[in-house]
Image: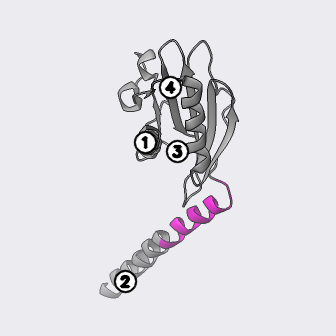
Amino acid sequence: MKHRIKGVLVKAIWFIGFIAIVLPTLIFFAGQLGFLTGKVPQDLGVKDGRLKPPSNTPNSVSSQAKLYPDHPLRGYADIAPFTFSGDGQAALKKLAGILRSMPKTVLVTETADYLYAQSTTPTLKFTDDVEFWLSPAENVIHVRSASRIGRKDFAANRTRVENIRAQFQQN
């Protein structure tokens, strides 16, 4: 009986070890091969003075989260818009320069009042969509940053936006 229990324990330990090594390795290689990038959302941009609402999972931030009072993750997603003084178009151009200088980030769309960039995480190659909209009526630049896939982003989008804000506020 003892040999049987010992055999089961050894097999269980091997199985757990196998899962602990193989599963993370498979996920890592899936990311390296581009299987974790997700699809480009077709509903990005500004519609009626609003960026897309925050995600229904805790993996996005939006300076317009308050516009969606019944949204279940409004509190999680809420982040301040970018403030500036002077010319809004110059402020947006400054943001575009910051985005261009960021590693693993590609500025996809740049118009007079809107920026859209795709940012890729370093290890697993998740792609996040980052948008900025110059709102002349409010004299701010609204921001939305969201992961394409996954339920949680472990504050990656918030951290990215706050890092961009820190660079933006430097003269």
Amino acid type, callout 4: His
Q: Is residue 150 above or below residue 74?
A: below
Q: Earlier in the sequence, mark 4 or mark 2?
A: 2
Q: Which circle's residue, 1 or 4, is located before the other in the chain?
A: 4
User: Residue 170, labelled with which disc?
Assistant: 1
Q: Which residues are magenta?
A: 21-35
Residue 28, magenta (yes or no) = yes
Q: Which residue is mark 2?
A: 4
Q: Position of residue 139 (x, y in %)?
A: 48, 18
Q: Is residue 109 left or right of residue 164?
A: right
Residue 155 magenta-highlighted: no
Identify residue for label 4. 142
Mark 2: which secondary structure? helix
Mark 1: amino acid: Gln
Tell me the element at label 4: strand
Between 108 and 151, the one lying in front of the other is 108
Instruction: Give the residue drawn at x 57%, y 61%.
Output: 27
Image quarter of residue 10: bottom left
Would you say the magenta stretch is mainly helix, strand or loop? helix
Q: Amino acid at mark 3?
A: Gly
Badge 4: how crowded within 10 Å, few (<14), some, or many (20+)?
Answer: many
Q: Residues within 10 Å of mark 1 (few under 14, many from 20)?
A: few
Q: Which residue position holds label 3? A: 150
Q: Position of residue 40 (x, y in %)?
A: 68, 38
| Closer to us: 90 or 152 | 90
Instruction: Tell me which numbered mark, 1 or 3, is placed earlier along the sequence.
Output: 3
Say which label, 3 or 4, has the lower sequence index: 4
